[in-house]
Image (tube, coloured by chain):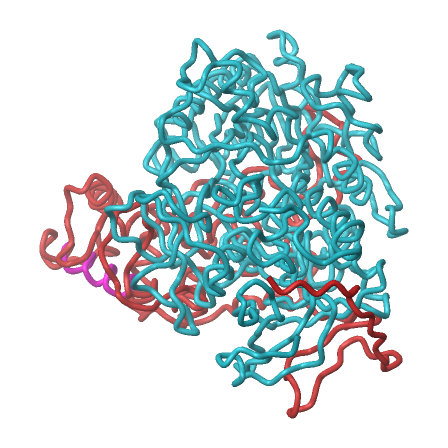
Amino acid sequence: MKNDNRRLSIHRRELLAGAAYLALGASRSSATVIFDHLPWTPNAGSPPSAASLGPWHFFTGEEGRTIEALADRIIPPDPETPGGKDSGSALFIDRQLAGPYGHQDGLYVRPPFLKGAKNQGHQSEKSPAQEYREGLAALDKCCSAQFAGKVFYELSDADKDRVLRGLESGEFKFDGVDGKAFFEQVIKDVQTGFFADPIYGGNRDMVAWKMIGYPGARYNYLDWVSRHNEKFPLPPVSMTGRAEWTTSTRR
Amino acid sequence: MDDVDAEVTMARRLPRRDVIIIGLGWTGSIMANELTDEGLEVMAIERGPWRDAPTDFPPTYMQDELRYRVRHELFLRPEQLTFTFRNKTDQTALPIRSWGAFMPPNGVGGGGVHWNAEMWRFLPSDFVVKTHLTERYGASFLPEDMTVQDWGITYGELEPFYDRFEYLCGTSGTAGNLRGQIMQGGNPFEGSRSRPYPTPAQAQPFSHTLFGKAARELGYKPFPQPSGNLSQAYTNTLGLKMGPCTYCGFCEWFGCSNYSKASPQTTILPYLVRKPNFSARDNSEVIRINLDKSGNRATGVTFVDTSGDEWEQPADLVILSAYTLFNVQLLLHSKIGRPYDPVANTGTLGRNYTHQTISTVNGFFDPKKFNFNPFIASGSIGMCIDEFNGDNFDHGPHGFVGGGYMGQVQTGARPIESTLVPPGTPKWGAAWKTAVKDNYLSTVKPGTGVHGSFYAYRDIYLDLDPTYTDRFGRPLMRITMDLKENEIKQNRFLTDKFAEIVKAMGANKLDVHYRTGPYDITTYQTTHLNGGAVMGTDPTTSVINRYLQNWDVPNLFVLGASAFPQNPGYNPTLTVGALAFWAAAAIRNKYLKSPGRLIDA
């Protein structure tokens, strides 16, 4: 073993006064070097961008009607709280599928794609966007074959639920698509949209948070941590505030 | 000194530094601060971005469950680097395409950014577990394929460094054993501590106190979980000021902008970065530790910047302080040490890889009588008991070893993941909606309520995958991992005990989730991955010595939970930090005086 017994040498580096982030020129590394003080930049973080209202970004008109019908059976409206459709879960899924999530951005998508055990995780080459497109088409195809040409959103609520219970139990099968897995994904996404911050298009006016008593994107419960078995009295707030703060722009 | 390997001559060479630190998380920050105190020129190289508490996690939009929890905003992107996984050696490992069982960190602060900040010390017997269990129960009591071993360090040796890390972080808690004296209200099973916690325990919400009461009535000795989310303002040992936690319920998966959660950002970096002999480079991934021709001396590292250009950074001392899996992976790619072969039982690198055996019991209470406001919490809040951890109870009649703490340690009630319904409720439709509405405020969801040990086995290990590659074309690291009978038995025993307490709290209905095999890579089970480059006294069963110095390359130290020979029933970070201080003391007091092997192999 080569054993260098001299004490490690001490170098003092010349400092560029006031430069915390030193961007090195092309002749040197293009990475940044941080020294002397924290590289503070105002508003350095990236705030979330609000889902725009308006037409579908990913779904076709037909698909949109189907996903809205699915959302309303997964979360049916009741007199106090709107269902999945009116609370925006379909819009939420549309914007998610049109964005990074829909295209597996950031995930590991190198081949080979082999079929593994369930506990080895999702191994499909298909993005969520593709899986929705195929799943919705398969749903309408099967409904149409079984209900005299009617697609899913045209069925009665009782028939819709019959189809969905069949998918859940595995009795109602799709052609070439795993209907059970597809429905599980739709349930998960509709419910996620219902409980996510309204900035993403679902949970409109925080209806889901009002329903369960979640006070939202609050920040300080110091006065409440030791008040036991008392209902927290304040209404919820979202990252975009509350509807009554911004009525002039939200109408 | 200046010989350069043929394979690195393609990279351009940067000016030499005394010390290069790979990864600027907890251990890298601690080591950088200690070694700059010696006057050494230290540079940290971090794969991910620089992150600052108030600008990167602002309270105007940090409470975002979708972005940070569901879509994994702060974590490494699997496209950049992932692992393959299988249960058994005769299976084909497949890539983890999206994170599930654990969440690898990325960026300055590492896991210290988005952890829950539980600050547990390990039990004295945990460090000598092989000796202890063999003496108490006989060697034949341990499963034949179990490869637990002693750490090569004792609790007493580590105690001053536990203390240093606790005081750096301002840890909130109630001492249970002060200089040998058992204290009321603390954990009576903990090892002797030299000082009380720097700040008192956090306040406890309703359901957490209810657990404490029920446990006490059942004859246990509950105590508040030690917390790196502070109960009050604190000025730490480096003069940095922290604020009291506001119980916002967004700790795990999230960053804290309030300077309330201990992290490198809140406890070290603002102090460290002002030192003239420290610098850091972000968005730069170290792809190799370079060796000289002898193979016994590191000459520095090679990293890739954001343009994809390779750079060689020479250094006299290399500190590997990345996350557990990345430590082992970089050693494998750098061909330092002998890869472990479970069949021949040779080699050490990748051996004794472990996780954590966790489970939970959700309790559904009468909504007319109980309102828990479950969204009020911190990441490390809660009341716990330690009667069933380590060897705190007689394992003789039960036929397993190990154990864990248990408690109501609910970290909030973020609604996407915390809208639970009683067992038997439909998963969708009107009945589901009504059940969610009725139960949200009156459900206890402890999360990692049972937090058990995970001991090491001969055929659970890490090596390089034969098929899948990363963005540089290097093999991914392969995880071979399963749950063994010992851990499954342990979990059943502990979960049943836990369920009794949740029932005694007054729950009408319980939803009991035992941990069962096979090990599932899609279900979150903490990010407490350990081992693969373990510490020890014998170079044939360890990668680093008791000072975390590599046996083969003495100017390389490997920090982090990759050093754990097996995993006790606690969260790892306090021990990870204490070991970093311990290794730093060895470098400062011994190594710098005579660079070379601190222990003869």
Q: Please tell me which residue is depicted at 87% across the width and 78% down the height of the picture.
A: A18
Describe residue A189's horizontal placement relative to residue B1 as left or right. Answer: left
Q: Give coordinates of residue B312: x percent, y percent.
A: 60, 78
Describe residue B527's horizontal placement relative to residue B59 as left or right. Answer: left
Visible in this render: residue B202? yes
User: B269 or B130, which lies in front?
Assistant: B130
Quarter of the rendering occupied by the N terminus of chain B? bottom right
Picture layout, residue B529 above or below residue B470: above
Q: Please tell me which residue is depicted at 47% across the width and 71% down the height of the picture.
A: A54
User: B586 or A161, which lies in front?
Assistant: B586
The reply to whether the magenta stretch includes residue A133 is yes
The reply to whether the magenta stretch includes residue B543 is no
Picture layout, residue B265 above or below residue B277: above
Colour cyan belongs to chain = B
* Chain A tint in image: red
The extreme bottom residue here reads A27
Describe residue B234's horizontal placement relative to residue B599 as left or right. Answer: right
Q: Please tell me which residue is depicted at 73% across the width and 57% down the height of the picture.
A: B29
Picture layout, residue B489 above or below residue B440: above
Q: Give coordinates of residue B142: x percent, y percent.
A: 42, 22
Secondary structure that dominates the magenta span: helix
User: A5 or A240, which lies in front?
Assistant: A5
Picture layout, residue B287 above or below residue B95: below
Report which quarter residue B571 is drawn in: top right
Describe residue B219's horizontal placement relative to residue B5 as left or right. Answer: right
Q: Please tell me which residue is depicted at 84% across the width and 59% down the height of the picture.
A: B38
Visible in this render: residue A198? no
Q: Give coordinates of residue B30: x percent, y percent.
A: 74, 53
User: B583 or B196, which lies in front?
Assistant: B583
Write down the region rendered in magenta: A131-142
Report which quarter residue A150 is drawn in: bottom left
